[in-house]
Image (cartoon, grey):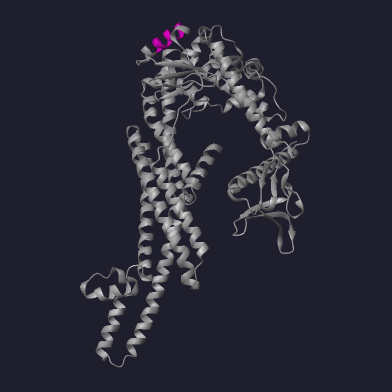
Amino acid sequence: MALARTIHADLLRVFVLTLVSLFAIPAATLAFTEYALRSQDAAFLQSIEKRIAGDAQLSSKDKAEATDFYRSHPLSRACDATAPEDRNFHDKVCSPYSMQWQFHWADRAAVWTIVLGAALLAAALVLGALAFANRGLRYASFVAGWRLMTVSSALEVVLQSAMLVWLSFWLTAYFWQSYYVKLIALAGIMAGAAVFYAIYTLFKKLPWGNEIEGELIAQADAPRLWERIRQLAGRVKTAPPDQIVAGIDTNFFVTEAPCEVRGRTLQGRTLFVSLPLLRVLDQAEADAVLAHELAHLGGGDTRSSAALGPKLLQFDQYTWKMRSGGLTIVAHYLLRLYRMIFAFALARDSREREYKADRVAAGLTAPQAIVQSLIKISAYASYRNDVEHKLFAQNREHDGALGIARFVADGLPPYASSEAFIEAMKTADVPHPYDSHPPLLERMRNVGHHVPESAYGAIVATAPQASWADDIETAPAIEQRLWSDYEQRFVQNHELSLAYRYEPATEEERAIVLRHFPPVGFALKNGDRIDITYAGMHPSADGGSTIAWDEVKGLTYKDGSFGDTLIVTHHDKGMLGARTTKVKLAGLGKQKENFKAATGDYWQRHQIMRAQQKQQEQQP
């Protein structure tokens, strides 16, 4: 229930942000142009009526006709006046690039941008509804939505960027009879960058990949396993996989998408088997899992995933790139909303496919076998995650091999008899890289075999009499290589984490921090320099006083004609508000971006370290 509330809250938040991103700028433009046009109508009519009334050369009839003409032809409609008798009025008032011409077309652009936004929002909802209603239409609806949303969102960026630049001039010019070149230039640069980024990303071929960490199992290395899989595939009435990949991840899956294994691209049907899980499953339980995965192949699930998967990935990449392009944020939330709606349809379909595959597996093997396999896989994944989390949370450097595989294997039976195990299993999901799997209890009900919680521990603690892992001659060597690579990355990531956690307080801690955050120096004008370290900033000019990161509340970089300046805002108060320190950076030149990156990274490290310390102090 809590997860459902979080999902609904997230969907509502994205929907509100979509409304803001689609309509805020065009609505502001429309409100401003309508106000200005109506105000000009009133002022113009008042002025023209006064002139007509004071014109002694006009007869009463002429004055009445002239007054009627201008009352029926307000200034705001001059650009729409296309009748031959109105041509003179149109040409005088609405000449190209005049104020009236600009306000007229800005008003129209705002209206049509709002209409476009509403149409895109409706299209996202309709296409999302199609994905819910019909699985056969899901691929076509997503492809249509993908093309419509990406192209139209780029158009939204162009239109709204143009409006923002126009507003940056006319808002101040209209209300205060002045304009600010820097404001217009800033808006122009932001708009130009956003338009370029949106269009460039739209036509750029974004990379996508489907790398599987594992190694191929040749038929000669596991002939009995290959034969068993072919038998199960025949009973499922589907073709067997073209290749089997063995790894150490805590899941089994099949895919028909092209994938890369150890630098080799695989085509066709691929079955991934987990060697650690095969070692905890007996052959009957493993058969149930393999039959479940083959049922996905037979049901066409992997075929549709193979077609849709690359497009989903590229759509996601484009969506998140729109978040990082400044004004392209106006496109991000619409794309994200559509993706969330489509994800709900995929998740619902995924659950239905899992139920069906479970029933197929239960029918080919036994309901007891599929249920016990689910319990064992959930338990192993939960315990391994707990072990790795505790290892990563340790506040000391890891030396040598961690031995995660042996540690998990030895500790799983005792864990299965603990209270923590039962609590974890109550809401357990079976891990899977592609689908949103239903909870364990629902899957038990689906196959008609219920196991009480009190029996979970005995099932998990029971060692298999025979496992398919024993029939794979290359399994021990594959596991050794994969665990070695995995633990090496684990140790490296853990050390980087320590570099963020340590203050440092000892020489050993200082050595770790310096490996990842060594002092960085930048040469300035007249032989001056500024050094950035994990402790703070050390400018050599103005006495060379060090600014410790603990003193820093905010950093603002100011470009200047005679040299840039870093304004440091402190936590304490000065004479006129927060105390600030100006660090002169004359001569920084081409080092500017590197300086900004280093300053931001080292300050962020310090903030994370202090937050970690505070969190530890609050723990009982």
**Number of numbered discs:** 0
Residue at the spot 51% in from the left edge and 43% down from the top edge: 10
Give the residue furthest to the right: 506
Position of residue 150 relative to residue 75, above or below, is above
Is residue 290 part of the magenta span, yes or no? no
Task: Tell me if residue 1 can be seen.
Answer: no
In screen coordinates, is 340 left or right of 483?
A: left
Residue 180, compared with residue 462, is above or below; it is: below
Residue 169 is situated, as x and y percent measured from the top left of the image, at: 46, 65
Main secondary structure along the magenta-highlighted residues: helix
Residue that sits furthest to the front in the current view: 526
Residue toward you, 430 or 75: 75
| Residue toward you, 465 or 387 | 387
Relative horizontal placement of residue 369, taking residue 588 as reference (left or right): left
- Report x, y in % for residue 158: 40, 53
Point out residue 591 in the picture as x, y percentages from the top left corner: 60, 47
The magenta-colored residue range is: 222-232
